[in-house]
Image (tube, rainbow, N blue to C red):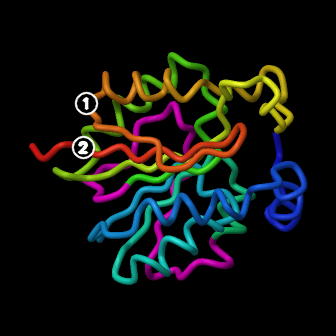
Amino acid sequence: MTWDPDTYPGTIRAEIEDYDELQERVVDATRGIAAQSILELGVGAGETAARLLTVHEGAHLTGVDSSPEMLAGAARILPADRVTFVEADLGDPLPPGPFDLVVSALAVHHLEGEHKTGLFERIAPALAPGGVFVLGDVVVPDDPADAVIENEPGYDFPSSVPDQLAWLARAGFEAEVVWTRRDLAVIRAAQPSR
C-alpha cells in the first residue's frame, strides 16, 4: 500500500473521528517520563512524533515506518537534529536501544495477534530499566455497536484490550488502560526496573 504524507492527515481524520483525541491521550500517557530516547513504531507523517518532541524537549526520537513516502513526509516537519528515521516493518528487528519510551499510535493493529505478541516481546528488552511502552490503537470493543472504524480485511487486525493486556503481561510488562472510546484505546505498559 502506498501512503501520501500530504493527504494522510485529512484521510485519517475522516476515517477516525476521535483521531486528535487519541493523539492527545497517547502523548498524555508519556508525561512524567524523563525520556531522553524515544522509539516510535509507525512514525507515519510525523504527527505523533512532533507532539512527543514538544513534551519531551531534550529527547531524541527514532522513527520507524515501512513507507519511504511517509518517512520523507515526516522528515519535512520534524527537526533533523532530534530525529533518526529507519525504514522497517514492525516484524523486523527493532533499532538498537535502550529506549526510555516506546510509542506506537495506529500501527500495531496491522499485525495479527501472534505478531503483536512477538512485537511486545521484542519491545520489552529494547526499553531501558523502568522504561514505558505506550500503545494507542484500534481495538475490538466489548460492545460490537462500538466498532465504528472501518477495518480493511487482510490489512487491519484489531485485537481486544484484554488480549493485548495479557500479551503485554506475558512479555513482562505491567500494563493498564488509560483511555478508551468506542473502538480506540490507549494502554500504558511499564517495564519493571531490572
For label 2, the residue is 191
Q: Earlier in the sequence, mark 2 or mark 1?
A: 1
In the image, farthest residue toward the top? 114
Gap between marks 2 and 1 measured at Cα: 7 Å
For label 1, the residue is 172
- In this rendered view, identify the residue nearer to me: 142 or 25: 142
Q: Which residues are magenta?
A: 75-101
What residue is rendered at 29% in x and 35% in y?
Answer: 173
- In this rendered view, identify the residue nearer to me: 74 or 184: 184
Q: Position of residue 159 (x, y in %)?
A: 61, 24
Identified by mark 2, the residue type is Gln
Whether pointer 2 and pointer 1 mark residues with C-beta atoms closer than 8 Å, the reply is: yes
Mark 2 surroundings within 10 Å by alpha-carbon count, few (fewer than 14), some (14 through 19), many (20 or more) = many
What residue is rendered at 74% in x and 29% in y?
Answer: 156
Asked if residue 76 is among those painted magenta in the image, a careful observer would answer yes
With respect to residue 6, does 3 lie above or below? above
Rendering quarter of residue 38 = bottom left
